[in-house]
């Protein structure tokens, strides 16, 4: 009860707005507001009044428009970019090194024996078809061949291309093959790989314009097939071991050896070794620019033991990347040549972005709808990992097996001809598919931190002719404990990786428009055009509330009068009381609900008199409070 | 607060009313009540004023004098300083307030001016997009322009004379490799050396200033004082004898002599000068035939996992590099794009570089040149190419950076070049519309336009008229750029052709087939830049060489009948390292 009374009182206080009609309210507002325009509207002559009215309207519109622009700018989440260049002590990048050949030929020979024999026969057949007829009859593993054979397509007659199996007369029994093959070496023949699925019923041809490509692609497909069936542990053993590959290592002034490298198995290049990966121990910093403070490596690639048909390029694959990130060395790696010293000056080019909603990027990839198969390596998110995972996902989905080059989710198997006879066809189809790639690109998001290592690469012959002897002696002694030279210029690579004089260039994003910016701009515009502040807005809000109240009061009065009229329809209406009359005529002289002022310094003598000439209203509080209270309490009951 | 101010105002009014006319501006309800009776007794100026007041009744501030008006303004304005001026009592205070107000106004004006001037500034934003990227156009040229066997008959005399020069200068022994050339020499024995007659190769002795010995005649010649050392402003040449040659205009009264510290440079420059002259007289179709065909140059081609061949390349002919082939620049075809990073999804090409067909005097290095550029951009073979070594794989990883600039008034950029006086240059190039025109970058960051001017169709007067346009400086063909006779504006006739030196050593030769025009062209609005990371590795490897070379020979068998050697081949990989594209964008800093 008490509370209700208090609330009522509050309401009454609120209702005691600055007037009882709209006009009164507006005049009061214009006169008392702190925004500059409205005051002029009411206290000037009619012409100026109009002008001021227009001006005020115009500026209000202007302010609203500007506010719209500012708010839109704020909501566009723009960023400003700051760039800094210089040298500072930084973590040395992680360095991944791989041999261009994934395996030692001497160790994988037994696996590739059949395939190599077949390949040699194919080459013989291509190069000298008439001679190889005899040798082609020797025992070959026909199952490999029959699964995905290489064919010659004779396009000399463009309307009737003739497809010839390379060993056609032996296996498929195609007629007139030998006759046309002899001529087919000339212009107009091209090679293709036949990929079949559904038990050889549905076949596609993958065309090549050169025999080199055809045989290389064919061989690598077959080799993939073979290696996919070998458990990874065995593959690691067949690849180059760290102690054989890394002959010497020096970081700054501190010696290091192959134990400082983390080994991972990268299907394309076999064993890869990562220096300073930062997975288990802290990353090593480098505090000085220059060769002397960087990483110096001497590597042996053992070029003589390369798998001859698998890789035609000899050298070291090398990549610089961030700590704890997976090296996608096939995409981003560079080559280092044997018999040379390759010096690589590094500039770390870092781009740090704000993330949502400022830039469309992801901080850790958690919101990307692709399962990351590289999570097993415990590496950070990268777009390459996402794309490859996405591809592998599609592969598993459509071919039912995973590709050998990408990591495998649990419970799935790598593709091979024995278990998944259709995989080559399926893979080839998927690899060429544009939609697959676009889906993946659409799904993956780039990482917010993009670090590129800008490299300045220079090369020199190494070892020099004068130093050749002793260097080879020492290295041979260290590696093989032999007094003879077991190394050659073709096999060794020297690498220097170091920071350049300026070792970082950081581009950092920061929010261009923050809340403070927004508020100060809103305030600035409002102040500039109309001289207002937030309090003016509150004043405006107050007026609106008053408007609402007046409306409610009027409505209530209307309703009441209607009810009364219905009740005493016979009467023309009650005779007006004094209070009502006074109200009807004198509300212009309403007094705001402010502290009482001394009558002789009354603040509004002019203002009261000016707009509407007439007698100043007396203080009718005693007269009008009584009926008003009755009315208001009623209205309040209706309103609530 | 309001109440207090008003009270203040009231007090001031009272205070002033003592000194001033007790006219209360606010108290005056309308102009009509203004006293009108004194008009008649007033001066004519006042009369007009009063008349105006009468005819144009003003509502609002009622101020018969400026002072009153100011007072009224100061009291009623919303700016804050003014009011204080009126309200303050005491001269010092008033002056202080006037000072403050004026300072504030001045500051506002200054700041506004600064704002207006800095309106057209830009802010730069760097963004990274991950998306499918357009593959750039790749132009591949052999370093050697023409097959030596094909052009030999044109260059026989020149070769012969070059050999003679080498022999007399350095005692160069007879070439064993090219003995057949020597047999020619006996035929030409009696002939007058025509090349060295026109531009004589000279040897200068340090101790005999102004004297030079002609190689061929052995005669000592008098050389006038204008001796131009190549790069003499950079280094002081200390050697005892220098080699050079002399360029004279037709009447031989005005000669310029060029000297080089090394005979290699001298002979190469001399050879090039004659070579250009000879080749300029050969029609383009013939030159294209003398150069390498696409099938010959490209042994294999592989893009984005799919085979490609010579048909994917377009030919363009470069005077110093012969036939060049551009990949991914086919007109009316969609630009190829990459949706995967890595070398296997890029362009893989094996090039056949036949070292036996190299011109021994023109080029001294072996390999190919590759330029990565935008499809609509001219490949600046001479300036920005990456050279490729034989028996190697050159792996070029790319990162794409795209820059967008704002056009006028933010920077000096042109959207399509229409607002740049290039039209003139095009028109000039139309002198020989059937020959290709070139755009080359200038040293000063502008562009240099090279277009052919056929000697027959170009009269002397025509040529001299060309540089009349002030923006156009005319430049001569690339090699002879070292041969400016030096005096600005003076035409010199060299070998029947005309050379004009522009103001800052900008030169122009006509008659040799090319004239070039330079103009600092504002850079375009958006440009793509490919940051390249080039690395080399041995290819083919020792073990794969055995099978790879025969297969490549088989592939190439259609064009050549020769077993390929690994030094005849070069492998090139061009690929996107990743699909991140950095965009550097300018946006207006102010709105």
Image (cartoon, rainbow, N blue to C red):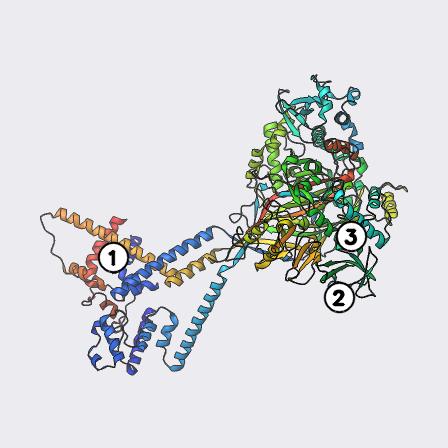
Q: Which residue is mark 2?
A: B225
Q: Residue B191: horizontal and vertical position, in percent?
A: 80, 49
Gap in Å between the C-alphas at discs 2 and 1?
Answer: 101 Å
Residue toward you, A19 or B314: B314
| Mark carried by residue A75 | none
Seen as rendered, the residue at the extreme left is A570
Gap in Å between the C-alphas at discs 2 and 3?
Answer: 63 Å
Q: Residue B392: horizontal and vertical position, in percent?
A: 75, 41
The subunit carrying tag 1 is A
- Magenta stretch: residue B330 in it? yes
Q: Residues within 10 Å of mark 2 (few under 14, many from 20)?
A: few
The subunit carrying tag 3 is A
Q: Nearer the viewer, mark 2 or mark 3?
A: 2
Name the residue located 13 percent from the left edge and 47 percent from the top edge. Answer: A567
Q: Secondary structure at mark 3?
A: strand
Gap in Å between the C-alphas at discs 1 and 3?
Answer: 88 Å
Q: Secondary structure at mark 2?
A: loop
Q: Are marks 2 and 1 in contact (CB under 8 Å)?
A: no
Q: Residue B176: horizontal and vertical position, in percent?
A: 86, 44
Q: Which residue is mark 3?
A: A254
Q: Secondary structure at mark 1?
A: helix
Name the residue located 20 percent from the left edge and 73 percent from the top edge. Answer: B33
Name the residue located 21 percent from the left edge and 61 percent from the top edge. Answer: A587
**Taking the image as drawn, is residue B446 in sight?**
no
- Magenta stretch: residue A484 in it? no
Q: Residues within 10 Å of mark 3 (few under 14, many from 20)?
A: few
| Mark carried by residue A22 | 1
Q: Are marks 2 and 3 on the same chain?
A: no
Q: What is the magenta range? A: B329-335
Q: Are marks 2 and 1 on the same chain?
A: no
Q: Is residue A599 left or right of residue A490?
A: left
């Amino acid at each position: 009860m008490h509370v209700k009374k208090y609330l009522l009182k509050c309401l009454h206080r609120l209702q005691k707005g600055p007037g009882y009609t709209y006009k009164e309210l507006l005049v009061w507002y214009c006169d008392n507001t702190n925004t500059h325009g409205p005051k002029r509207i009411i206290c000037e002559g009619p012409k100026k009044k109009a002008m001021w009215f227009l001006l005020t309207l115009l500026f209000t519109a202007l302010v609203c428009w500007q506010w719209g622009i500012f708010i839109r700018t704020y909501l566009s989440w723009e960023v400003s970019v700051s760039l800094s260049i210089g040298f500072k002590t930084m973590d040395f990048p992680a360095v991944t090194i791989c041999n261009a050949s994934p395996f030692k030929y001497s160790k994988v020979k037994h696996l590739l024996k059949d395939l190599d024999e077949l390949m040699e026969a194919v080459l013989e057949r291509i190069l000298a078809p008439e001679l190889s007829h005899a040798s082609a009859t020797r025992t070959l593993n026909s199952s490999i061949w029959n699964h995905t054979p290489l064919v010659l397509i004779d396009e000399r007659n463009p309307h009737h291309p003739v497809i010839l199996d390379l060993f056609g007369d032996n296996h498929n029994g195609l007629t007139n093959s030998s006759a046309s093959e002899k001529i087919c070496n000339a212009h107009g023949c091209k090679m293709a790989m036949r990929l079949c699925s559904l038990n050889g019923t549905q076949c596609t041809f993958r065309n090549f314009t050169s025999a080199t490509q055809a045989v290389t692609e064919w061989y690598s497909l077959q080799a993939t097939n073979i290696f996919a069936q070998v458990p990874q542990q065995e593959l690691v053993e067949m690849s180059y071991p760290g102690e054989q590959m890394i002959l010497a290592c020096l970081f700054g002034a501190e010696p290091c050896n192959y134990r400082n490298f983390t080994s991972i198995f990268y299907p394309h290049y076999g064993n890869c070794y990562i220096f300073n990966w930062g997975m288990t121990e802290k990353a090593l910093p480098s505090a000085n620019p220059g060769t002397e403070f960087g990483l110096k490596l001497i590597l042996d690639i053992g070029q003589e033991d390369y798998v001859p048909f698998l890789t035609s390029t000899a050298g070291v694959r090398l990549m610089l990347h961030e700590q704890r990130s997976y090296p996608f060395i096939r995409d981003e790696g560079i080559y280092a040549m044997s018999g040379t010293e390759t010096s690589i000056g590094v500039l770390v080019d870092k781009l740090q972005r704000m993330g949502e909603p400022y830039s469309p990027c992801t901080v850790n990839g958690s919101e990307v709808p692709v399962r990351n198969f590289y999570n097993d390596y415990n590496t950070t998110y990268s777009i390459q990992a996402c794309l490859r995972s996405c591809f592998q996902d599609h592969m598993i989905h459509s071919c039912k097996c995973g590709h050998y080059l990408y990591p495998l989710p649990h419970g799935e198997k790598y593709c091979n001809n024995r278990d998944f006879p259709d995989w080559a066809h399926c893979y080839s189809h998927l690899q060429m598919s544009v939609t697959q790639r676009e889906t993946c690109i659409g799904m993956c998001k780039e990482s917010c931190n993009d670090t590129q290592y800008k490299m300045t690469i220079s090369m020199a012959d190494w070892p020099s002719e004068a130093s050749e002897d002793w260097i080879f002696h020492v290295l041979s002694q260290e590696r093989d404990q032999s007094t003879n030279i077991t190394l050659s210029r073709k096999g060794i690579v020297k690498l220097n990786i170091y920071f350049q004089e300026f070792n970082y260039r950081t581009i950092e994003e920061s929010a261009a428009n923050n809340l403070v910016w927004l508020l100060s701009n809103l305030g600035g515009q409002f102040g500039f055009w109309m001289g207002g502040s937030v309090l003016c807005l509150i004043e405006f809000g107050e007026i609106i509330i008053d408007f609402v109240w007046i409306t409610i009061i009027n409505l209530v009065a209307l309703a009441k009068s209607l009810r009364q009229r219905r009740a005493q329809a016979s009467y023309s209406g009650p005779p007006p009381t004094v209070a009502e009359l006074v109200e009807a005529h004198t509300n212009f002289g309403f007094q705001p609900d402010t502290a009482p002022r001394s009558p002789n310094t009354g603040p509004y003598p002019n203002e009261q008199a000016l707009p509407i000439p007439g007698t100043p209203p007396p203080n009718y509080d005693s007269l009008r409070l009584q009926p008003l209270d009755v009315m208001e309490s009623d209205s309040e009951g209706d309103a609530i | 607060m309001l109440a207090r101010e008003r009270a203040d105002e009231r007090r001031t009014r009272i205070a002033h009313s003592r000194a001033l006319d007790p006219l209360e501006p606010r108290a005056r309800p309308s102009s009509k009540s203004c006293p009108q009776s004194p008009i008649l007794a007033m001066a004519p100026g006042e009369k007009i004023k009063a008349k105006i007041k009468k005819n144009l009744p003003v509502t609002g501030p009622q101020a018969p004098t400026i002072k009153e008006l100011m007072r009224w303004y100061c009291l009623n304005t919303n700016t804050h300083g003014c009011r204080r001026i009126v309200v303050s009592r005491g001269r010092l205070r008033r002056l202080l307030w006037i000072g403050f107000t004026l300072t504030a106004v001045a500051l506002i004006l200054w700041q506004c001016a600064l704002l207006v001037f800095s309106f057209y500034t830009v802010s730069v934003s760097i963004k990274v997009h991950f998306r499918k990227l357009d593959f750039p156009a790749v132009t591949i040229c052999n370093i050697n322009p023409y097959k030596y066997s094909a052009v030999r008959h044109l260059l026989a005399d020149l070769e012969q004379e070059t050999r003679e020069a080498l022999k007399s200068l350095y005692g160069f022994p007879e070439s064993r490799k090219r003995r057949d050339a020597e047999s020619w020499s006996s035929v030409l024995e009696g002939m007058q050396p025509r090349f060295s007659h026109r531009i004589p190769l000279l040897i200068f002795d340090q101790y005999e200033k102004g004297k030079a010995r002609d190689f061929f005649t052995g005669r000592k010649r008098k050389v006038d004082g204008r001796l131009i050392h190549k790069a003499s402003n950079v280094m002081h040449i200390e050697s005892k004898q220098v080699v050079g040659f002399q360029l004279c205009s037709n009447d031989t009264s005005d000669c310029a002599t060029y000297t080089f510290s090394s005979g290699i440079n001298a002979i190469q420059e001399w050879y090039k000068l004659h070579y250009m002259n000879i080749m300029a007289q050969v029609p383009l179709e013939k030159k294209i035939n003398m150069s390498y065909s696409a099938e010959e140059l490209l042994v294999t081609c592989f893009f984005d996992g799919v085979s490609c061949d010579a048909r994917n390349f377009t030919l363009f002919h470069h005077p110093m590099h012969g036939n060049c082939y551009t990949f991914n620049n086919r007109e009316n075809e969609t630009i190829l794009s990459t949706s995967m990073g890595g070398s296997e999804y890029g362009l893989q090409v094996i090039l056949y570089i036949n070292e036996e067909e190299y011109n021994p005097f023109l080029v001294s290095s072996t390999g190919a040149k590759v330029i990565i550029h935008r499809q609509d951009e001219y490949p600046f073979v001479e300036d920005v190419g990456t050279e490729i070594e034989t028996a190697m794989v050159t792996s070029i990883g790319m990162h794409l950076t795209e820059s967008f600039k704002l056009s006028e008034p933010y920077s000096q950029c042109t959207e399509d070049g229409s607002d740049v006086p290039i039209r003139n240059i095009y028109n000039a190039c139309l002198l020989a519309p059937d020959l290709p025109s070139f755009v080359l970058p200038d040293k000063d960051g502008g562009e240099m336009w090279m277009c052919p001017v056929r000697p027959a169709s170009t009269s002397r007067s025509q040529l001299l008229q060309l540089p009349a346009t002030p923006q156009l400086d005319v430049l001569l063909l690339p090699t002879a750029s070292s041969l400016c006779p030096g005096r600005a504006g003076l035409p010199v006739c060299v070998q029947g052709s005309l050379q004009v030196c522009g103001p800052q050593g900008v030169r122009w030769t006509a008659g040799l087939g090319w004239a070039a025009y330079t103009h600092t062209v504002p850079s375009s609005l958006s440009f793509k830049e490919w940051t390249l990371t080039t690395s080399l590795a041995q290819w083919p490897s020792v073990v794969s060489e055995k099978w790879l070379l025969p297969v490549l020979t088989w592939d190439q068998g259609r064009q050549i009948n020769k077993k390929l050697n690994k030094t005849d081949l070069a492998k090139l990989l061009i690929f996107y390292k990743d699909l991140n594209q950095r965009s550097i964008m300018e946006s207006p800093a102010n709105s």
